[in-house]
């Protein structure tokens, strides 16, 4: 039982990180139907900005996270403007290849710029306290709690933005029908930019959290979490914000249990296995609705 | 007007010319490679080009002609490579048998994966195939019999110019003839409009699985050749980055252009080799080239046109249209 709860705690932490990345994926997919393969790499850049802020500027972890979010928001908008916007009306595959190109560009420009080696956040970035619950059998660390709280806090803010603000309303309108939204006087370009900015900021927060939680950053760190967060978004139903959360927590928990009880070598295979199962049984994801194709 | 007999005669003449050209190119390659006229760096790249041509042409059948967005080609390549290697190294079968069984296993994997997942469309299929490719890689990583993460080392070099060259020719001939047959029309109709194709009585699932299995078969062939040329195989060789590489060749060459795929396989392999000495910025440049190409020529180098000698002559109308009947 203690083992079970411990894995649950680990899974929730992992799920919180996936959730922050998956939200960005799902928002971008919802609005321009593009699998933004570079999203995981934006997260990596965020992790490096966080490292720079804590190690060089000596900021505390929350200020570092804020800085990383601002930098990545700008980066996300620049990527969208330069690489994706000119392809908005071309084929999906061309856009996807471009996204792969951007992903490789970010990865290897970092390998070139900062070197391929792993780096660690300075010690004491986060006060390392742990709490023992259930008669001391289950350990919850301050890292777990910060991860969960930051993730929940940002999700609440995001939900507020999407459902209660003007820009959120515009996003939902563009996502529903871009052309009709344009006819109604919505500035589609700035709405898409805002989506990229918000999604990239969330990824940056996730990057800093990964840096603190696993205490290691490297230029290729974005690939696997990026893919898994994407899988999580598809699992919940891509384009649906609560779906991204549900999918992410499910993925995180399943992964923790596979690592804890089985072999950690198989956790990637299990993640993709779940994905394929879901796609075959319910291709639109757990929370998605089936839309008939118009002929 | 050209009489039927004359038509047959001129077709026959074309075929004979082609066979002669194929044999001539083989002899040139054989003399140059086996005669030691080409240094080892270029030799490696010539073999890589050949393997990449097989991969790109076979993925083009799935992505370009049938319009099914697959990004798990490296997974099938891995199946072919591992099965062939196990057969030659551990079980002692001759290379030809190993290559055939490896390719068939990859084709079978394509069939098994294609059957359930081809109900998915567009991006969802892409994700599912990506997932399958990764699952194959993770499984190989965990099977001790094939060396786990370290892979298999010391594979005998059995891939020679003849094997490589005739595998390429086989791939191109089979896929070109398939495309120009009535089955090929079915593939293209699925790409253009799946629902319309189904309405016209085309069994779309059957054709999609067929394209998927044949594409996977040739990916397996490329894998077997790769393993028996490069001395070692590891699961990480067949990661999704490899799948992306192949996809990039297909898209760069033009979706639905076999000659485009061949051209792109050659160009990209050479570009990659030329940049090998700038290891660090190589991938950065590769990425920039990729992005710029997509921005300015998203349909690829060739679009869906084929490169042929008749393009140089006066336009006589598209030869392939004559298949419909005159």
Image (cartoon, coloured by chain):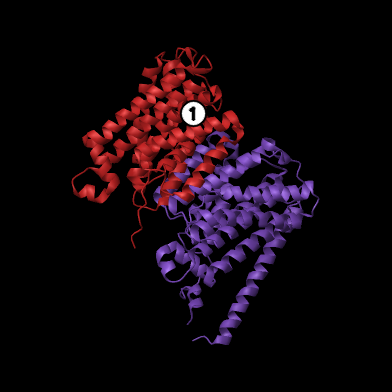
Chain colours: A red, B purple
Left of B277 or right of it: where is A212?
left
The residue furthest left is A185
- Indicate the position of residue A159 as horizontal and vertical percent values: 30, 33
Residue B236 % position (x, y): 62, 39
Classify residue B191 by image quadrant: bottom left
Furthest residue toward right:
B92
Which picture quadrant has residue B218?
bottom right
Left or right placement of residue A25 versus residue A180 in this view: right
Identify the residue shown where x is 59% and y is 82%: B8
Q: Is residue B307 above or below residue B90?
A: below
Q: Nearer the viewer, residue A62 or B291?
A: A62
Q: Is residue B256 in view from this perspective?
A: no
Count of marks placed on residues:
1
Mark 1 surroundings: few (<14), some (14-19) or many (≥20) residues within 10 A? many
Residue at image coords 48%, 22%: A213
* Image coords of residue B18 (percent x, y): 63, 70
- Residue named by callout 1: A11
| Most foreground residue, B279 or B228 | B228
Q: A149 above or below A73? A: above
Q: Is residue B39 left or right of residue A215?
A: right
Chain assignment, label 1: A
Above or below, comparing residue A113 to residue A266 in the picture: above
- State the image coordinates of residue B87 (x, y, percent, origin top left): 76, 50
Q: Is residue A134 visible?
A: yes
User: What element does badge 1 sit on?
Assistant: helix
Relative vertical location of residue A32 with respect to residue B277 in this rendering, above or below: below
């Amino acid at each position: 039982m203690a083992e079970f709860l411990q894995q649950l705690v680990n899974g929730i932490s992992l799920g919180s990180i996936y959730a922050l990345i998956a939200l960005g994926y799902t928002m971008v997919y919802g609005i321009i139907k593009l699998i933004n393969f570079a999203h995981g790499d934006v997260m990596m850049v965020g992790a490096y900005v966080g490292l720079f802020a804590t190690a060089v500027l000596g900021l505390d972890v929350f200020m570092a996270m804020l800085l990383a979010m601002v930098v990545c928001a700008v980066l996300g908008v620049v990527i969208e403007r330069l690489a994706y916007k000119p392809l908005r009306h071309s084929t999906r595959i061309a856009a996807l290849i471009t996204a792969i190109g951007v992903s490789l560009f970010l990865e290897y420009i970092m390998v070139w710029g900062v070197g391929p080696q792993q780096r660690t956040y300075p010690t004491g970035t986060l006060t390392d306290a742990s709490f023992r619950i259930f008669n001391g059998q289950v350990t919850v660390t301050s890292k777990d709690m910060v991860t969960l709280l930051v993730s929940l806090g940002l999700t609440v803010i995001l939900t507020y933005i999407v459902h209660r603000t003007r820009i959120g309303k515009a996003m939902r309108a563009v996502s529903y029908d871009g052309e009709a939204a344009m006819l109604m006087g919505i500035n589609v370009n700035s709405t898409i930019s805002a989506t990229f900015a918000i999604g990239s900021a969330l990824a940056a927060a996730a990057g800093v959290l990964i840096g603190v939680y696993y205490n290691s950053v490297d230029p290729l760190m974005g690939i696997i979490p990026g893919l898994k967060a994407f899988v999580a978004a598809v699992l919940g139903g891509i384009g649906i914000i609560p779906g991204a959360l549900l999918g992410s927590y499910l993925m995180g928990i399943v992964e923790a249990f596979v690592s804890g009880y089985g072999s950690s070598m198989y956790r990637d295979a299990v993640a993709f296995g779940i994905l394929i199962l879901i796609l075959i049984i319910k291709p639109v994801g757990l929370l998605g609705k089936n839309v008939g194709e118009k002929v | 007007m050209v009489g039927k007999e004359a038509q047959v005669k001129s077709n026959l003449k074309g075929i004979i010319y082609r066979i002669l050209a194929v044999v001539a190119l083989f002899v040139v390659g054989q003399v140059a490679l086996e005669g030691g006229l080409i240094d080892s760096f270029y030799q490696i790249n010539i073999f890589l080009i050949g393997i990449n041509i097989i991969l790109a042409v076979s993925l083009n059948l799935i992505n370009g002609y049938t319009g099914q967005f697959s990004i798990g080609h490296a997974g099938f390549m891995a199946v072919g490579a591992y099965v062939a290697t196990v057969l030659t190294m551990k079980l002692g079968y001759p290379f030809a048998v190993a290559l055939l069984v490896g390719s068939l296993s990859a084709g079978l994997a394509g069939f098994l994966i294609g059957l359930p997942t081809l109900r998915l469309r567009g991006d969802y299929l892409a994700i599912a195939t990506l997932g399958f490719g990764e699952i194959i890689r993770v499984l190989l990583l965990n099977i001790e019999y094939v060396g786990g993460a370290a892979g298999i080392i010391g594979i005998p070099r059995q891939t020679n110019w003849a094997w490589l060259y005739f595998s390429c020719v086989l791939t191109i001939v089979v896929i070109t003839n398939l495309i120009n047959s009535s089955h090929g029309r079915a593939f293209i109709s699925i790409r253009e409009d799946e629902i319309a194709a189904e309405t016209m009585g085309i069994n779309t699932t059957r054709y999609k699985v067929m394209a998927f299995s044949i594409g996977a078969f040739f990916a397996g062939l490329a894998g077997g050749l790769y393993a028996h040329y490069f001395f070692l195989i590891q699961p990480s060789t067949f990661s999704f980055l490899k799948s992306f590489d192949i996809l990039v060749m297909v898209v760069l060459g033009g979706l639905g252009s076999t000659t485009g795929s061949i051209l792109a396989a050659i160009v990209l392999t050479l570009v990659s080799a030329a940049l090998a000495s700038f290891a660090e910025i190589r991938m950065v440049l590769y990425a920039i080239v990729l992005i710029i190409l997509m921005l300015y020529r998203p349909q690829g180098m060739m679009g869906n046109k084929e490169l042929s000698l008749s393009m140089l002559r006066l336009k006589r109308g598209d030869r392939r249209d004559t298949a419909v009947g005159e």
